[in-house]
Image: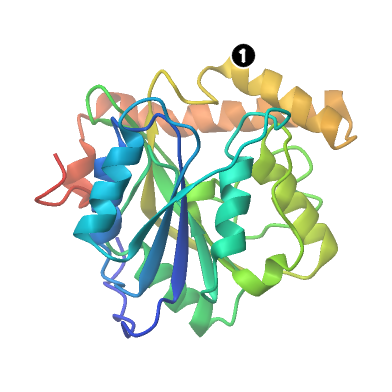
Amino acid sequence: MSPTPRPLPATQPLVTVIIPVRNAGRWLPDCCASLRAQTLQAWRALLIDDGSQDNSFELARREAERDSRFEVLRCNREAEDAAGPWLPRNHGLQQACSPWIAFLDADDLWHPQKLNAQVEALVRQQADLCVCAYYRYADSSGRIVACRTPPAEITAASLRAVNPLPMSSVVLRRACLQDLVFRDVSHEDHDLWQRLLAARAVRFVRLPEPYMAYRIHASNLTQGLGNRLAMKRRSLLSSQQGVWNGMAMTGWRQLGYGLQSLPWRWRRERLESRGFLGADLN
């Protein structure tokens, strides 16, 4: 990690954190604990329940009772609405009023310095979108299996086939979105980033420090190479892009990710050794 960023003032909420919740009771307490541990305290979190059938809604209400910065909402999904987190994310965008927006999936974790480091970088460099490097770790063992760093520059052209901007790693200026929302397509985040960069100039900053942790488990939407390629094909078709070229670029990127993961196979390093797990996060 780089030197600890200078703490930002905790006055009005600087960041609205949008957290879709659907049957995430197993992971939600850890996710919320990693948010409460942030050194930047000026945030508001929207826990948006999307028809959970487990104890997610009760756990979300418990978080709101414990910390008033959490707010629990329900997502009103109609019968004709396609499945996926696009709808609760849009509901969160409608409720957001802070200058910055962050997205956090309920099964992911943040390092305590994440929001502070990203907002500081955005303000210092007068940028619009900040993405950080991130770990991938096994839910069953807590072991880190990979560390991925986004490219230093992102353009609309470079986004045509691959998505180097995982949702939980992004902090974005709310005003940049204007009328843009998530659509009910495969890889709705990739679709949004493409439309955003095609519509307007976005000043981009990357942090090479891994301030986010992506949890690998059996319920991941993108679990398995075959599933990821199938989702990518649907995404390319929905955005009317070249399928074969896009699939080739996706395969090339996956090969690169595999090579990046090789050094971690011989390590036995758990996520908490990198400062992610606090005293109340078991």
Give whichever of 117, 99 is nearer the camera.
Answer: 99
Which residue is found at the position 51% from the left and 74% from the top?
98
Where's residue 185, x and y in %?
74, 34
Left or right of 11, for residue 17: right
Pick whichever, 62 or 216, lies toward us.
Answer: 62
Residue 64 locus on image (x, y percent): 28, 56
Q: Is residue 246 left or right of residue 193?
A: right
- Side (left or right) of 259 relative to 116: right
Determine whether, in the image, residue 14 is placed left or right of residue 90. Answer: left
Find residue 94 and report its image quarter. bottom right
Callout 1: SS: helix
Which residue is rendered at x = 26% and y = 72% of the image? 4
Q: Mark 1 sits on what residue? A: 226
Instruction: Give the color scheme: rainbow, by chain, secondary structure or one colour.
Output: rainbow
Q: Is residue 260 visible?
A: yes
Q: Position of residue 115 (x, y in %)?
A: 38, 66
What residue is rendered at 11% in x and 49% in y?
A: 280
Above or below residue 256? Residue 86 is below
Quadrant hosting residue 118: bottom left
* Front residue of 33 and 134: 33
- Note whether 14 is above or below 248 in the view shown: below
Which quadrant holds the C terminus?
top left
Q: Is residue 149 visible?
A: no
The image quarter containing residue 93 is bottom right
* Residue type of the residue flagged with mark 1: Gly
**Picture layout, residue 52 above or below residue 102:** above
